Each structure stands twice: as C-alpha cells, then as structure tokens.
Image (spheres, rainbow, N blue to C red):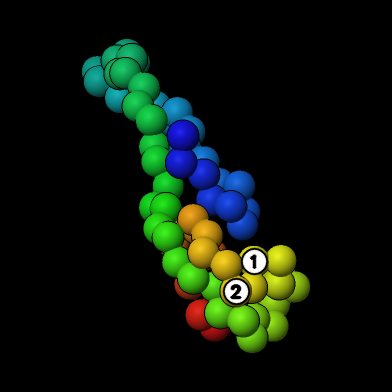
Amino acid sequence: MAKCQICDKKSRIAGNFVKTRGQYNPTGKRRRKPNIQTLYVPEGVTKRAYKDFAGKKVSACAKCIKSISK
C-alpha cells in the first residue's frame, strides 16, 4: 500500500448516501488514494519536519511536496 513517508497519509475508504424521494439509497464504498510521488528532498531544507529526509529520495504526497518547495 502506498504511503507518504513524511506525513503517513495513506488510502482510506469513503462512501456517501444519496437521498432520493425522502429515502436513502445506500451506494457502495470506494477506496480513495493519495497523490503519492517520488522526489529528492534537497540538502538545504529549513523546515523541521523535513530535516530527517534531507538529501534522500522519498515518496511524498502532493501536499508535502508543495510545502517543501515553499
């Protein structure tokens, strides 16, 4: 199972109920997967959460990739 090595985000099961004519129509559940990508974390990272991964290749979610670049 794919998992973000930085924030430990992983897949989860989600479902919803559709209301039709005052009654609920139970629909199936499905697995929601995070946007995991491989990247190289640069050496000069200043944020404390990413210092352990500096200079390494990691699998990270899109949210972590965005915050590393800031």
For label 2, the residue is 55
Callout 2: SS: loop
Residue located at (60% from left, 74% from top): 55
Could you tell whether 43 is left or right of 16 in the image?
Answer: right
Q: Is residue 3 left or right of residue 27?
A: right
User: Could one spot residue 3 in this view of the protein?
Assistant: yes
Q: Secondary structure at mark 1?
A: helix
Extreme residue toward the left, this view? 21
Please state, as top left, top right, bottom left or bottom right, where the C terminus lies in the image. bottom right
Please give the name of the residue rendered at 46% of the width and 34% of the height, measured from the top-left corner.
Answer: 1
The residue at 30%/24% (across/down) is 18
- The residue under the point 71% across, 66% down is 52
User: What amino acid is at disc 2?
Assistant: Gly
Percent across and percent down for residue 31 are 38, 30
For the question of whether residue 16 can be seen, the reply is: no
Name the residue tied to disc 1.
53
Q: Position of residue 17 (x, y in %)?
A: 36, 23
Does the CB distance between marks 2 and 1 fall below 8 Å? yes
Nearer to us in this view, 36 or 20? 36
Percent x, y for residue 13?
45, 28
Residue type at mark 1 is Phe
Give the quarter of the image for residue 48.
bottom right
Query: What is the spatial separation of the Cα atoms under label 2 and label 1, in whole angstroms?
Result: 6 Å
Q: Relative to residue 16, is residue 41 depicted above or below? A: below
Reply above or below: 44 against 3. Answer: below
Query: Residue 37: image x %, image y %?
Result: 40, 58
